[in-house]
Image (cartoon, rainbow, N blue to C red):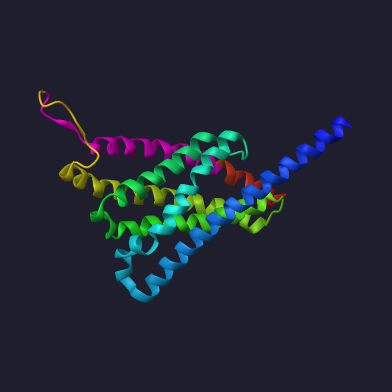
Amino acid sequence: MTAALKVESRNALDAVRRYYLFLYYLLQFLGFTWTFSRLSANLILQGQGSLYSAFSSCAQVLYCCQVLAVLEVVNAVLGLVKTPVFPAMIQVMGRNVILFVVFGSLTEMQGRSVAFYVFYLWSSVEVFRCPFYMLTVIGKEWRTLSWLWPAVWVLLYPLTTVAEAVAVLQALPVFDETGLFSVPLPETVGFYISFSFSLRLYLLLTLFGLFINMRHLLSQRRRCLRLRRD
């Protein structure tokens, strides 16, 4: 009887985990699909002018998506998903630095075209990734999607990293001029620690993160190709 209760309890907990993860990926899918659709529609209707209004058009929805994305790390730490903790942390922290610090805190960056490219690449990846994981957590598989989403991510992830790096490079002079987030030192020292120094370190970590995540993605890509052949 006790063993049966343990099995039933495990099944109930697993069902809760699946419902929670499905709801999480569904919410992310809706948010990024809305972003992708909004940017695409603006590009068709407004042409080149839409490149400079991406932040004002989509920032609020992306804020919600990226706050929610912290659960990616929590899920990995708790073992609710098989994703390694470090790649998940790199992905989430990197995007949050770009969204909340580079674009969110600098009005000078919000009207630049690089915001459009960053947001469009983010949403392009997520509209494939989220449905894949939604199906995975309920034990379903669509082989076309299983093959397609790693292919899309392997193609777009380096482009996303380049776009994010361009955004950081464009923001460096602004942080140097304004002194925003810089740490003042005693007057006897005569200088302060510029926040742009932290962003330069972030660029180095981004290159390292690109290597780590690409290795992880390529391994998933090979697994999906094997499944497709079988």
**Magenta span main SS:** helix
In the image, 192: left or right of 217?
Answer: left
Q: Quadrant of the N terminus?
A: top right
In the image, 11: left or right of 55?
Answer: right
Residue 80, image x, y percentages: 63, 39
Looking at the image, which residue is at 49% across and 55% down?
125
Res. 143 visible in picture: yes
Magenta segment: does it hold 221?
A: no
Which region shows up in magenta? 189-218
Judged from this view, the residue extending furthest toward the right is 1
Judged from this view, the residue extending furthest toward the bottom is 45
Decide which of 207, 181 is in the foreground and name it: 181
Residue 170, image x, y percentages: 24, 50
Residue 27, image x, y percentages: 55, 56
Res. 225 visible in picture: no
Q: Height in image: 72 above or below 148?
A: above
In the image, 202: left or right of 145?
Answer: left
Residue 24, image x, y percentages: 58, 51
- Number of marks in the rendered image: 0
In the image, 28: left or right of 161?
Answer: right
Judged from this view, the residue extending furthest toward the top is 188
Decide which of 162, 108 is in the foreground and name it: 108
Magenta segment: does it hold 193?
A: yes
Residue 182 lies in what quarter of the image? top left
Looking at the image, which residue is at 43% across and 38% down?
209
Looking at the image, which residue is at 49% across and 43% down?
70
